[in-house]
Image (cartoon, rainbow, N blue to C red):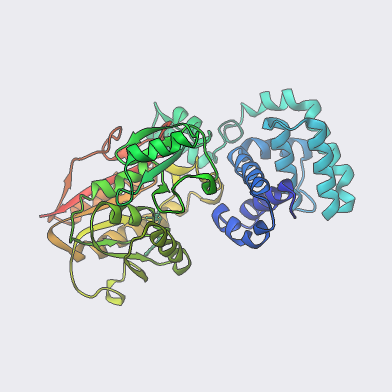
Amino acid sequence: MSNPRSVAASLVNRVLLDKRSLTQALAEDRAGAQARTPDARAAAQGLAYGTLRQAGTLRYYLSRLVGRPLEPGDLLGTLLVGLYELDAGDTPAYAVVHETVDLAARRHPRARNFVNAVLRNFQRRQKALRADARADPEARWNFPAWWLKRLQGEYPRDWEAIVTIQNSHPPMTLRVNRRRTTPEDTLAGLDAAGIPARRSGPWAITLERPLPIAELPGFAAGQVSVQDLGAQWAALLLEVGDGMRVLDACAAPGGKTGHLLELAALDLVALDSDAGRLERVRENLDRLGLDATLLAADAADPGAWWDGKPFDRILLDAPCTASGVARRHPDGKWLKRAEDMQHLGEEQARLLEALWPLLKPGGKMVYATCSLFGMENNGQVTAFLQRHPDARRETYDPPGAREGQLLPGPDTDGFFYARLHKT
Ligand SMILES: C[S@@+](CC[C@H](N)C(=O)[O-])C[C@H]1O[C@@H](n2cnc3c(N)ncnc32)[C@H](O)[C@@H]1O
């Protein structure tokens, strides 16, 4: 299993066939990953992410080349990774075909000729297939048809730029821990290590090229974290100050929890319904030298966990379609279904309703999502304001946002923020 191609094929199968997220699949794969070199691990992840980013095109090719259900079904991952490498990779084609056929034959000896025929056929018909793919929206844009339709409806001018940027490689952005260092010193340290980088936000530094975390100066010492620039606005918008009592209602894996605690000395409760993911919050806080009360509970059921003391600030980073972060999590677009919008919308409204009474008069709540879909964002907030006359929306947008909606761009993923003031 130490061959990156074989690991990538199994990760792709885990996402497309078993409907696991790539993060879950990678975590489940940890035991195997430990046996591999960091380079092999990076190569496997590069292939898996690349294949999933372009799975619309690659599945289209496969359907044209095979034209019947795959047998056995788990050849899917192997074939998609092979097609990805032939279509977009820089490994010589003969090596890709040879190694992919070997890989398939190891698991399914009778598949050797079939896999060989599919890949060689692709090489022969590549030009025509590429041209034909442009007529099929899912193959052309690498997003499910329902998702594209929604984006086109909501962003008639911007949708093409949005999907184009979401099909590119995301930048790697650091958040500087202001308790341990400064952006200036961090930039100087990166420069001294020969890592080109630039300041991109109040606490943000964007690297010219992504790096494995292990090679990042100051990461293990808690001087920096990895966090998208757009995600860094959440904690800033909450306007926290020393001594405040703060609730981070959907906290895991703790990116924003850490940022809040870096900004001020807080009495912070970090809650998440997923106890496993909550462990990641503890790991992150330990690395940063910070502390919070961690609770595994349903935030929308305060009777089960709240001690009755109201909060000065609440961050509700609600579960959503994650349509704004498809560049960083290309598995999400193939896992979410149009029907999920309804269920997620109900959950977002349930969380808003349950948490509002926990906020002190004069307190502030930031409602955040990493979605581009209006129904999860301004739709949710408008309906909430109609139900709550004691809530006022403060017009404060992060740079580049419109009505709280930050669109994906070269430096940032897509997020939505609304700050609600309790009058
Ligand atoms: C967008 S993620 C949060 C990301 C996190 N704030 C960060 O910056 O790292 C949403 C989180 O909400 C959690 N969640 C979903 N429903 C919840 C509920 N009813 N109560 C508490 N947490 C919930 C999920 O487990 C998930 O970890």
What number of labels is visible?
0
Residue at the location (59% across, 30% down)?
140
In the image shown, does 73 or 178 lie closer to the viewer?
Answer: 178
Q: Is residue 351 above or below residue 394?
A: below
Q: Is residue 380 above or below residue 400?
A: below
**On the image, which quarter does residue 267 sit in?**
bottom left
Relative to 243, 278 lies left or right: right
Q: Quadrant of the N terminus?
A: bottom right
Q: Quadrant of ligand 1?
A: bottom left
The answer to whether residue 297 is seen in the rendering is no
Relative to 109, 12 lies left or right: left
Residue at the location (40% across, 29% down)?
156
Seen as rendered, the residue at the extreme front is 192
Pinpoint residue 341: horizontal percent, then vertical percent: 42, 51
In the image shown, does 29 or 284 lie closer to the viewer?
Answer: 284
Residue at the location (20% across, 40% down)?
396
Pinpoint residue 85: horizontal percent, then vertical percent: 71, 35
Pinpoint residue 213: horizontal percent, then vertical percent: 52, 47
In the image shown, does 422 or 169 lie closer to the viewer?
Answer: 169
